[in-house]
Amino acid sequence: MSSVVEPASAPTWLRPERALDEPGIARLPDRDRPDGPVTTARLRRTVAGYAAVVGTGAALARIARDRPAANAAVGLVAPGAGYLGAGRPLAWAGTQVGFGLSLAAWLGSGNVVAPVATWLGSALHAGRSPVRRRRARTVVPALAGAAVAGAWAARERGHRAALARRAERDRFLDERRAAVDARVVDRAPAAAPQVGPELSADELAHARWVLDRALQPIAAFDGFDRIEQFQTSSVRYQLTTMGHALSTLQYARTPAFHGYLSAAQRNLILKWEERINWAYWAKESAWGHLRYDPDPVPRDNIMLTGWLGYQVASYVSNTGDERFSRPGSITFRHPRGQEYPYDLHRLVDALARNFEASAFTLYPCEPNWIYALCNGYGILPLPVHDRLFGSDHAERILPAFRRRFEDEFLSVDGRTVGIRSALTGLSIPAMTSILSDAAVVWQLAPVFPDLSRALYEIVRHEWIRIPDEGPVRIAMKGWDAIDVGNYRRVPATALSAIRWAATEMGDVELARRLGEDAEALLDPVTEGGVKRYRGASALSNGALLGARVANVAGHRHRIAHGLPEPWATGPLLDACAYPDVLVARAVSDGRDLRLVLRPGRAGGSGRQPLGLRRLTPGATYRLTGAVQDAVVAGADGTATVHVDLDDRREVVAVPEG
């Protein structure tokens, strides 16, 4: 992937046939300061607090004069600075390494104790050495003040440059908006979702890789990556990403199939109960909140509550199965005997409480750190719950969420701020990247489609080019080129995130080319009818499946609108053997059932039973493609038919009359 992007050409990626489904294009936030009001207040508090520490350290160093305590006082000004007064440069250098590691611990697991302990510990230790460099007590505070002033000045310079970029991007978005308005005279509601084409044999092979992991016993994690359980390679993120892929597949290609596809999604939800997926929280609560609390739901931790909540809400919306709405249907059991019972309702209630309690509305993953991407998942269960159960969470929270997202997590020039410290207001520029932008585009499409469209237009216009030959050219930086599921330097995660966003936005040519790039770059292999990308992590293999089976605007329809009436009430395939029967397409118009099946065994799977459900009780259904010509539905609306599955087979069940 090249980081060099050629000059922009005229945008051509919006499919004309999607005109009636076009949600409009939002304007970039009109803000005259670099950051929103909450962030600005936190930054000022941080600077004021640090200025007080510098002043205190400088004053104490003067008072202590040549006593060793002067080194400790200088050490308050900056980590390890006391060693400079003690004439111990190696100790100073070692402290910089240690402090850097402590900051990584703070970022990676919310461990606020580590940097504070490293800073104060080095100051106290330096205070045991005699003063050898008197100038340190003057030079170190002066340098600290200059560094803060320089950073603030750089922030202002960056803001002026961002204002110029915003003006350019506003002009571009105005042009795009005019083009959309020229096509759409009377804005129509979103077109009804359509079932996509049947899954190809290659797509089914890829789906089997995810299904094999999902359908194993709940306590088993064979085929998952197990590296660490605090950051992005954690097993919990693999569970969620595989769940996203399967819920996308079900809605986009096989809404009239439950069976093992729904069972796989249930298994992935229940696997969250296993200790490996939530044990981390007791540690993070202890060193981030300074209190021991193993319960992973009530406070912060949107990386569990939001991600799991979205996964459960997607399953319930797709299937109508409300088992995870029952009290205690998801229970975290501690080895010491404590139990923390939850369900979809309690997860959504916890999300709503945390959103409403946060000054940013968006709230933290690890204690202190707020990720835009995690909150993008965490906001989605609210509209689904409202639609299914008549609550009002989205009505209460979405307006504030959007306002705070635009103010605090969208830069002046229209980039997603990937991460922000709730405590200090600081962000990490390297996490403002095309991976974060693309992920948020897809996440926010169901709730803020106009904002999602605007962000995508900017990304697509400025950082992505499709050459006539060769891979798509993407301007990558920071973590874009890293597979976040195993930390290897390969752009598997970015390819899947951008492809998912491109498909959602109707940019089908880009999505197709990114699929070709995955085949060329990620070392695909098919063994025993199961396909995986050896160059990608388990997480990215799941994401790549979801991105390739999605439909245009499918995420928006799935979350904001759910199942159309014919899909929700029509006949469905509810039981078949896995992997003997692979379901490539399953759709109902409310009366009939149309299936495309393939065998999962080399040479064919022979005669296979199919369990049908939601038929009209007592009605006769004419069959095409089955062994029998007709079947009569039982009093409970079920029936069993048989098919000889030696190759691709279409099966149709149509009621008489």
Image: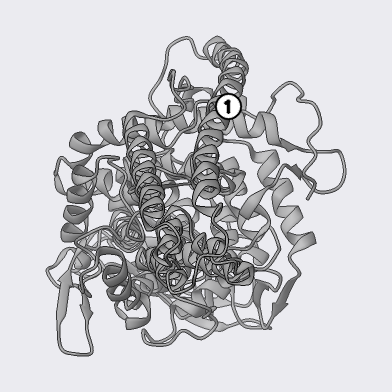
Q: Nearer the viewer, residue 415 or 627?
A: 415
Local crowd at mark 1 within 10 Å, few (<14), some, or many (≥20)?
few
The type of residue carrying mark 1 is Glu
Whether residue 608 is visible: yes
Q: Residue at x 48, y 46 (%)?
A: 141
- Res 42 → quadrant: top left
Q: Residue furthest front?
A: 66
Write the residue at 42% across / 87% down. Answer: 220
* In the image: residue 535, left or right of residue 62: right
- Above or below — where is 249 with respect to 580? above
Q: Which residue is mark 1?
A: 17
- Residue 590 visible? The answer is no
Secondary structure under badge 1? helix
Estimate the x, y position of residue 537 in percent, counting from the top left. 61, 70
Q: Nearer the viewer, residue 557 or 338?
A: 338
Locate residue 432: give its quadrant.
Answer: top right
The residue positioned 46% from the left and 33% from the top of the image is 410
Count of residue discs: 1
Horizontal side, residue 109 vs residue 527: left or right? left
